[in-house]
Each structure stands twice: as C-alpha cells, then as structure tokens.
Amino acid sequence: MRWTLKSKPEKEKVQKLQNELQVDEIIATLLIQRGVETYDQAKTFFRPTLDDLHNPYLMKDMDKAVSRIEKAIENEENILIFGDYDVDGTTAVSLVSSYLKSYYPNIATYIPDRYDEGYGISYKGIDYADDNGISLIIALDCGIKSIDHIAYANAKNIDFIICDHHRPGDELPNAVAVLDPKREDCSYPYDELCGCGVGFKLIQALAQNRNQTIEDLIPYLDLVATAIAADIVPITGENRVLAKFGLEVINSDPRPGIKALVQNVKKKILTITDVVFIIAPRINAAGRIKHGNEAVALLTEYDLEQAEIFASEIEQHNSDRKDLDKKITVEALSQIETNGEKEKFTTVVYQEDWHKGVIGIVASRLIETHYRPTIVFTKSGDKLAASARSVKDFDVYNALEACAEHLEQFGGHMYAAGMTLKEENYLAFKEAFEKTVQETIHPDLLIPEISVDAEINFSDINPKLIRLLSQFEPFGPQNMTPVFMTKNIKDTGYAKPLGQNDEHLKLFVKQNNSEGFGAIGFGLGNKIELTKNQKPFEAVYCIDENEYNGTVTVQLRMKDLKE
C-alpha cells in the first residue's frame, strides 16, 4: 500500500474557517479538503435541508416529460415503468411506479431478464408494451444510448421518456423527453445523480404540478438513499441531502420491503456503509440469481407479512450468490496464475460457464488480490458478456472507448462498465485493452493507495472532535470517512490475531503518555510482528465508536501499519 498524505490547505484559509466556526485546525482542514470554505457552505454541509434540493424543472426536457405523463393520465393510457435489473434500476422502478400508482391505476412495471435480454432497453420489453396496449414507456437508469430501440418503439407508436445518468453518446435517442444531467446541453446544477435520483426529480416535478410539497415525497427517500449507496455516486450536493434524509427514513419508518430486509440486523442506526453491505447486495441478488422483478415486488409491497416472505426468498438468492462468487473467484485466480497474467497491466479472464450474474462481483474480488483494471467475461447466448471494474483514479470507460472497434456494445462509468463482444474478437480485444491501459495508466495507480486526510497525535482525539466527525456523515465518494496518520505508536502488549485464519489484528495502542485506544485491523493479521516488544510503528486509521453491552468507546479502525 502507498500512503498519500493530502496537501495542507493554505494556512490563512484554515485559520479564517477556524475562527468563523469556532472549531479546531483538524476540522477546518477536513472541511476545506471537501470544498467547504465559508460559514454558509459549512452550514449547508452540517445542516442539510430538503430546501437545498434544486428545482426539477431546471433539468432539460423535464417540462416535456411531465406534460406527456399528464396527457397519458388524462387520456387513460397504459404506462410502463421500465428499469434495469440492478439496485439503481429496481429502486427507480419501485419509486416511480409506486408514486404514480398513488393516484393513477394504469401502471405496469418491466425489468429485463439479465440472461435473456441483457442490460438496458430491450426489443422484448417494447414488444411486451405493444402486446399490452401500452403507449408510453418511462425508462429509468438506462436508455441514453438506445437509438435503435427508441426508433423501433416509435414505429409502433409507443412514446419513450428516458431518465438516465450514464454518459450520452454523440447522438441522443429520439424520445419525447431525455432526462440526463450529463447531457452536454443540460444546465442542471448537479450532474452526479444516480438513475433513481433522476427518477426522484421526475416525481418531484410531477408533485409540484399537483400542488404537493417535498414533505409528501419523504416516504420515497429510503429507495433513493439505497440507490445512492449502491451505485457509489459522490455523496456531495443533492446526493448528500437525499442520502441523509433517506437514511432517516430507513432508520425510522422504512417501507415494509426494506424493513423485512433489515429486521435481523442488530445495529440501532444503519449508515450508508450498512446499506452498501446489507441492503444493496440482497436487492441485487434477485436480478443476479433469479429475476429483478422479485426486487420490485419486495420494494413495492405494503403488507409486512408478504414482504417478509419475499425477503426470505431474496435472502436465499443472496446466499446462492455468495457461493457462486467464491467458486468463480477461485477459478479466476487460478487462471491468472496459470496464464502468467500477473505481469500485465490488466486482468482479463474468461470461462464460458461462469454465472453472468456475479462476474461484476468477481471482478471486484480479483482487484483485491491483483490490483489492475479488471474484466471478467462469460458466455451469453452467441456472444461474450463482461463486467469491468477499475482501480482508483483510472477511467476504465475511456479505455473501453479506445477499444470500441472490437466491441458490440458497452456502457458504464469511470470505475464500472459492462460490454458484449463476438467470441472471435475476444483475443484482439484483450490485446487492445492491455495496450491501451499500458499506454495511459500511471504506474503508481497499480499500487493500492490509502489517501490520508491529516497527520494527528492521539492527544488530538477528544469528544468534541468525535462529535464533529460524526456530523460529516453520510460518508461516501468525495466525502469519505476521514483517514488519519499517527507516528511513534506502541502496542501495550495486547496485540493478538483474530479470525479463523488469524487474518485480523486486535491491539491496544498508545502514543507517548497519551490515553490508550483499542484498535482493530481487518486483514492486517500478518502485520503483528511490527507491533511486538513495544516497537514503535506508524499507522493510518479511521476513528470509530464501538458499542458493546451499552457502553460506547473510541476504537481505531487500522487501515495499514508500517515500521
């Protein structure tokens, strides 16, 4: 691991903010690093309100989208809510369909089958709409590149409203309205919304049109927060507001489907991290193992008993998913060893019987062992399908764009993408991807980085610091949990390995004559030698509060140790 200490902001800026907020240097430094430099910005950061949300009509084509939906309701048309099979797509479909159904009955939902139809808008979905007398489709979390699909629907007199957040291509589909804050000609003030976030802006605009207030939409925010967490979008601006209030709904009065998913969780207060690791994988498991429809059924169910039945089925899918991704990860690691892939700038592996539903997870697992831009392929019909994952600060989408001649289709983000290609193009693509990454990646990016916010002493850790750090939540991309570095630490003799294979490390650490802290290092069991015989070492860590038997203590979550 390489430790990168963030550069300190200008001293004058720090002192000015310190004085205005009456906080110490550490807090002022952390705020400025997050782009919070004035009293007013700090007020918005620490006290976000729903009034901070932008007017949805600032989004290009929003007026057209609302007008077409109102016309459909007036004419008693059938409306289909179409969305992708991942968390962002299924939450978005649940959000928009349940909102519209609250005052209009002619609403159906459609999630494409991951294996039969693949990602995004499908011809099969359009045919379903045609067969069922549906004249308007609202597509969520997909559609921005579906030029041919929209033309096919237009030929059948089916209108489309697209709500997407992926990067558009050179041409936009010929839909009634294309809502995407990443459109070049869209001046919406915040362009990092997830698909469900764009769906929320649509219902916010519809609500305004019906003289409803933002308060009427609070019950839908548990879905938006779940999508924000799962889609790993920046927790800044509107996303931070939506995530904060959505978490409040999850912790106080969630919909029955989410309540059923978390009722066995022992924690009193769930954080964004809990949503990422507890709620999101279970919602995702439906589309990975069975069908995304099961996730929508769970998230739109209003009867708790029925929701519990759906949740237990999804729990089984999640268990099956875990077994599959473990098995495939072992097979992929073996392939890397055998084929000499370790020396390359990329990891690209393929086996035709790997389960398409878990290859994205496997790609992430491989990066944990071989830190490289990674693509995992499997057979899908008469083509190969793949999921790509990237390392920090490397744009895998751009790399795929450079290899587009070998691909049938691709889409995604900087850190995650999906693609299909013809089997005969696999080796040519693999070579081209390796060459592109080799020519464009900085060698440092192939070494995992821990970004350190500030160097502090243990004497700086006090109740006021911990209280203010808790107000930085919700954490996520561009507002990560602060990471600190402290030098000249000693273990007081309590260091011991934990876990089945001694993979974790438990410590009790002090610096000079400071107060001591309990510490845990997940995956750091092999560093125990550094801590023996009271040898001094340095550490990077996050500050957590650990609750045990009703007592709350400060615990340092070690990320790495060095001599």
Image (cartoon, grey):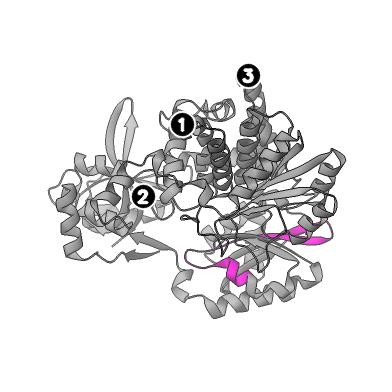
Q: Is residue 500 above or below residue 511?
A: above
Depth check: give the residue in front, 68 or 10: 68
Which residue position holds label 3? 305
Disc 2 packing (10 Å; few <14; some 14–19; many ≥20):
some
Query: Mark 1 or mark 3: which is in front?
Result: 1
Which residue position holds label 1? 215
CA separation, marks 2 and 1?
29 Å
Left or right of 493? Residue 306 is right
The quadrant of the rendering that contains the N terminus is bottom left
Q: Is residue 128 above or below residue 155?
A: above
- Residue 318 is covered by the magenta coloring: no
- Residue 103 seen in render: yes
Q: Where on the picture, by quarter, is residue 539?
A: bottom left
Q: Where on the picture, by quarter, is residue 516?
A: top left
Q: Position of residue 414 (x, y in %)?
A: 55, 63
Which residue position holds label 2? 481
**What residue span does the magenta drawing correspond to?**
376-400
Depth check: give the residue in front, 323 or 164: 164
Q: Where on the picture, by quarter, is residue 206?
A: top right
Disc 3 packing (10 Å; few <14; some 14–19; many ≥20):
few
Name the residue located 30 percent from the left edge and 55 percent from the top edge: 36
Secondary structure at badge 1 equals helix
| First of labels 2, 3 by sequence position | 3
Three-letter code for the amino acid on which mark 2 is drawn: Thr
Disc 1 packing (10 Å; few <14; some 14–19; many ≥20):
few
Q: Position of residue 486 (x, y in %)?
A: 24, 56
Secondary structure at badge 3 equals helix
Left or right of 62? Residue 554 is left
Q: Position of residue 476 (x, y in %)?
A: 43, 50
| First of labels 1, 3 by sequence position | 1
Q: Position of residue 151 (x, y in %)?
A: 79, 58
Three-letter code for the amino acid on which mark 3 is drawn: Glu
